[in-house]
């Protein structure tokens, strides 16, 4: 009798284990790789295996190729920047990076300091959360950033993505659009017809409300965990013809970035404002952009090499 | 807490674990607590109503046994009980409808402006548990069952969560003994649990893959504002899909209920038996919502005299049952109209049977072709009647029927215009495949073959494979998630 009960218990456990594994596998296949590819790669890294982790927005993952860094400069890094990563998200990405990799340094691209966003739409939030391991950072981030009734779809994104059965393709099974180091490359080219307008380095503007507090939290988190924090901002332009983001917005952002520079200097942090090193980077308006805000793979290669050769990335 | 929600699955898992672990004698208390929690999860105030009918019928049964020798006192007690239960039903379900009707009539007469229509929240599943409650009182009155002395066990009989909000409407003589002998249920009966889980899985398949997918087209075509944009075969397709939707929705719920109960060791009554394979309206009602048909038969049709008081009286009784059945389904004249249609057809069947047997039977002797023709005819009639059920009123019903008759536009079946009704081509194909699978299952039911038994007779690896594939199919192709609110089962509103 006892033997039979034991057998039933063992069989039940095996059945549930296989079911969970199958659901986990399905979840990974159906996850939108545009949103979840990076976090999936991050979660499959061997623990404490990278020295440098990048956090920030699309400007950073379009600008820096961790594969070039490794192959040409031996820099062992991971790109954890995601589209529309707000400062609170960056804080939790930093927490996640420290928990899983405890890197020597974190390079934080501060573009979203200028727009002052704390939360973004659920759709955009999936770019950050999809594929993220169910860790403490994810739990805290969801509590902070997502309405209670919507959180279930961040823990079980299959509830949203199961409708993708009609559009599954090779990359969904292989997740080969994102490299093992989180690198992504965009081939298309946009002919930028005007140069990036620059404000004087001394021109500053106050950071939007709440941004400084989050910056302080990120600084404190890194300090507490003895991780070097490097702040930077990658250059970008605005499209005058149709972009909602106007030249005045861009100049205001640049003034905010200069304030971030002051913030970094006051705290002894390394700071790189790449808007003022455009000539040295050598970006070509005709060949190096995929739109007005993001570099394509040509621009990415130039920018990456520049960052490595200057020692900004190490 | 919908069956097709994650909350229910978590609730069911916790209920099951508790049910298996706690001492046998206390199981019914655990299930009672779970059932009330289940019901309260919709609206805490509903619980009072459930509690009221429980107290009324429990006390009635005790009084009926005490008055066993006093016929008048018994009759009076039962009358009070039925009046109270029907009073609750009328107040919560029909009061607004009656006030609205009165307002319309008086407005037509030019004096109705002063009548206000009250907004009364319809408690979930009210018609189901009030009917079960009344059925129990009548059974005790007739002496077919004994009064349950344990009030908590009786409360569980009325509130048993798998069948609480959409049936089947159980009988005390079936469910009562099972609840009383709960402590004898074997905790771990792998075959029983697997069978229950398999039945649940099929219920989810019907609801989430077929019913909710068909609903997308049905909702588009039957939309009360834009239905005029659709004509001919498009409306036919939507009407047929509604026939399938309502079947898969309701039967799907029932399968989940039966399966969930079976996992715990209870046998609920079968509520559907391949209804669309019926060859007459009478047969349809023997196969559709069986527990309600039997309720009306035992507690209304027979007491009215059934067929014992002559043909005319029989036809009147049939009409009364069907009109009330229509009203049971919803507080609206189109529901009564729908019931009336079935009633008239049932009467016509009765009236025409001698003529049919004398002149037509030779053309329709028992053959595959004849059976198929009969099934198609009954299905088309039932489908046409469902239009009245689904429409927002009698006017829309007639408009839709008219648009089904013309224009003659069969090309819509092949010119891809059906893909513009809310389901794209791939989803449409999934729907068709799922319906074909459902037909196969119905054929097996019709031939009295148990697919679940056949699967459970296979080796372990195959059984597991069926579960894994079934779960994956439902999770991938089911209609649920962020884009869709889990849709309520249609029959909850009754």
Image: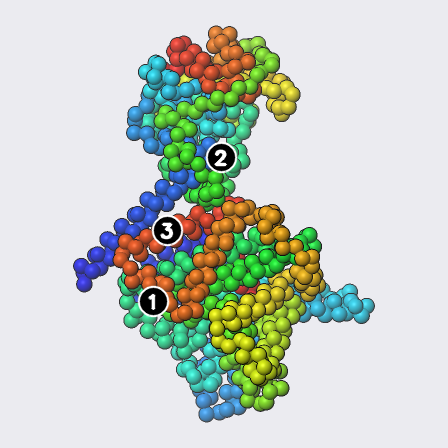
Q: Give the side of residue B75 with respect to residue B312, left or right.
A: left
Q: Could you say whether the residue bearing mark 3 is in a helix, strand or loop?
A: helix
Do tags 2 and 1 sit on the same chain?
no
Horizontal side of A18 relative to B319 (left or right) equals: left
Secondary structure under the numbered disc 2 in the rendered image: helix
Q: Nearer the viewer, residue A29 or B118?
A: A29
Q: CA distance from mark 3 to mark 2?
A: 32 Å
Q: Residue at x 48, y 80 (%)?
A: B137
Neighbourhood count class around disc 1 (C-alpha, 10 Å): few under 14, some 14–19, many 20 upward:
many
When the figure is inspected, residue B221 is found, relative to residue A261, above or below; the finding is: below
Badge 2 density bin: few <14, some 14–19, many ≥20, Cα 10 Å: many
- Subunit ID for the residue under disc 2: A
Query: Residue A102: x and y, percent?
Result: 32, 26
Q: Are marks 3 and 2 in contact (CB under 8 Å)?
A: no
The residue that label 2 is drawn on is: A125
Mark 3 against mark 2, which lies toward the viewer? 3
According to the picture, the residue beneath numbered tag 3 turns out to be: B469
Q: CA distance from mark 3 to mark 1?
A: 25 Å
- Please check whether the numbered discs 3 and 2 fall on a single chain: no
* Residue designated by label 1: B265
Query: How far across and how far down the image is residue B250, in percent?
Result: 50, 63
For mark 3, does the 10 Å Cα neighbourhood hold few (<14), some (14 to 19), or many (20 or more) residues? Answer: few
Identified at 50% across, 19% down, the residue is A295
What residue occupies the far front of the structure in this picture? B363
**First of labels 3, 1 by sequence position:** 1
Mark 2–mark 1 Cα distance, whole angstroms, equals 45 Å
């Amino acid at each position: 009798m006892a033997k039979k009960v034991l057998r039933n218990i063992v069989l039940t456990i095996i059945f549930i284990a296989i079911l969970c594994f199958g659901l986990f596998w399905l979840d990974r296949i159906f996850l939108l790789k545009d949103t979840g590819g990076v976090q999936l790669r991050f979660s499959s890294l061997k623990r404490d295996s990278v020295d440098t982790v990048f956090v920030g927005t699309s400007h950073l993952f379009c600008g820096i190729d961790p594969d070039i860094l490794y192959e040409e400069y031996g820099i062992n890094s991971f790109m954890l920047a995601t589209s529309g990563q707000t400062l609170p998200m960056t804080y939790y990405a930093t927490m996640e990076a420290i928990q899983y990799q405890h890197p020597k340094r974190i390079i934080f691209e501060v573009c979203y300091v200028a727009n002052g966003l704390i939360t973004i739409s659920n759709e955009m939030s999936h770019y950050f959360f999809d594929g993220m391991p169910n860790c403490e950072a994810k739990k805290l981030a969801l509590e902070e950033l997502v309405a209670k009734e919507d959180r279930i779809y961040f823990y079980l994104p299959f509830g949203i993505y199961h409708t993708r059965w009609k559009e599954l393709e090779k990359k969904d099974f292989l997740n080969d659009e994102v490299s093992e180091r989180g690198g992504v490359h965009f081939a298309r080219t946009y002919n930028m017809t005007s140069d990036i307008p620059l404000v004087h380095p001394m021109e500053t503007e106050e950071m939007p409300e709440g941004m400084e507090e989050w910056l302080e939290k990120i600084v404190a988190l890194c300090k507490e965990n003895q991780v070097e924090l490097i702040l930077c901002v990658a250059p970008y332009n605005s499209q005058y013809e149709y972009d909602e983001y106007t030249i005045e917005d861009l100049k205001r952002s640049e003034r905010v970035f200069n304030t971030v520079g002051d913030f970094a200097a006051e705290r002894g942090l390394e700071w790189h404002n790449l808007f003022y090193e455009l000539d040295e980077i050598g970006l070509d308006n005709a060949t190096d952009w995929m739109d007005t805000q993001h570099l394509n793979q040509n621009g990415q290669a130039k920018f990456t090499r520049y960052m490595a050769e200057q020692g900004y990335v190490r | 807490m919908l069956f097709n929600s994650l909350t229910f699955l978590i609730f069911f898992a916790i209920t099951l674990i508790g049910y298996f672990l706690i001492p046998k004698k206390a199981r019914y208390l655990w299930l009672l607590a779970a059932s009330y929690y289940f019901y309260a999860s919709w609206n805490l105030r509903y619980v009072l109503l459930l509690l009221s009918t429980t107290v009324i019928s429990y006390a009635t049964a005790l009084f009926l046994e005490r008055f066993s020798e006093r016929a008048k006192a018994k009759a009076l007690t039962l009358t009070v009980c039925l009046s109270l239960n029907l009073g609750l039903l009328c107040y919560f379900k029909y009061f607004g409808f009656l006030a609205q009707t009165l307002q319309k009539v008086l407005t037509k007469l030019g004096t109705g402006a002063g009548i206000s229509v009250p907004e009364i929240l319809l408690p979930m599943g009210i018609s189901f548990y009030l009917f079960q409650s009344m059925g129990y009182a009548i059974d005790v009155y007739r002496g077919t069952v004994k009064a349950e002395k344990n009030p908590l066990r009786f409360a569980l009989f009325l509130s048993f969560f798998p069948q609480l909000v959409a049936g089947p409407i159980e009988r005390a003589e079936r469910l009562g003994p099972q609840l009383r002998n709960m402590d004898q249920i074997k905790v771990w009966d792998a075959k029983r649990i697997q069978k229950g889980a398999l039945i649940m899985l099929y219920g989810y398949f019907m609801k989430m893959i077929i019913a909710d997918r068909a609903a997308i087209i049905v909702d588009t075509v039957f939309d009360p504002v834009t239905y005029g944009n659709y004509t001919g075969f498009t409306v036919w397709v939507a009407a047929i899909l509604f026939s399938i939707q309502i079947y898969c929705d309701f039967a799907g719920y029932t399968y989940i209920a039966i399966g969930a109960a079976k996992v715990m060791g209870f046998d609920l009554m079968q509520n559907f038996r391949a209804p669309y394979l019926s060859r007459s309206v009478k047969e349809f009602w023997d196969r559709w919502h069986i527990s309600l048909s039997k309720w009306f038969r035992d507690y209304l049709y027979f007491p009215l005299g059934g067929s014992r008081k002559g043909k005319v009286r029989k036809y009147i009784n049939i009409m009364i049952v069907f009109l009330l059945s229509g009203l049971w389904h919803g507080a609206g004249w189109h529901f009564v109209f729908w019931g009336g249609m079935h009633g008239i057809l049932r009467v016509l069947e009765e009236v025409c049977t001698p003529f049919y047997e004398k002149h037509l039977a030779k053309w329709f002797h028992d053959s595959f072709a004849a059976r198929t023709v009969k099934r198609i005819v009954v299905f088309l009639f039932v489908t046409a009647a469902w239009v009245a059920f689904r429409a927002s009123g009698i006017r829309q019903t007639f408009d839709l029927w008219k648009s089904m008759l013309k224009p003659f536009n069969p090309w819509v079946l092949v010119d891809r215009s059906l893909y513009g009704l809310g389901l794209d081509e791939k989803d449409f194909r999934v729907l068709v495949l799922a319906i074909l699978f459902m037909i196969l299952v119905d054929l097996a039911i019709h031939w009295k073959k148990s697919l679940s038994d056949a699967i459970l007779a296979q080796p372990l690896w195959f059984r597991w494979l069926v579960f894994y594939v079934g779960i994956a199919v439902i999770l991938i192709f089911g209609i649920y998630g962020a884009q869709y609110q889990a849709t309520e089962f249609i029959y909850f509103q009754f």
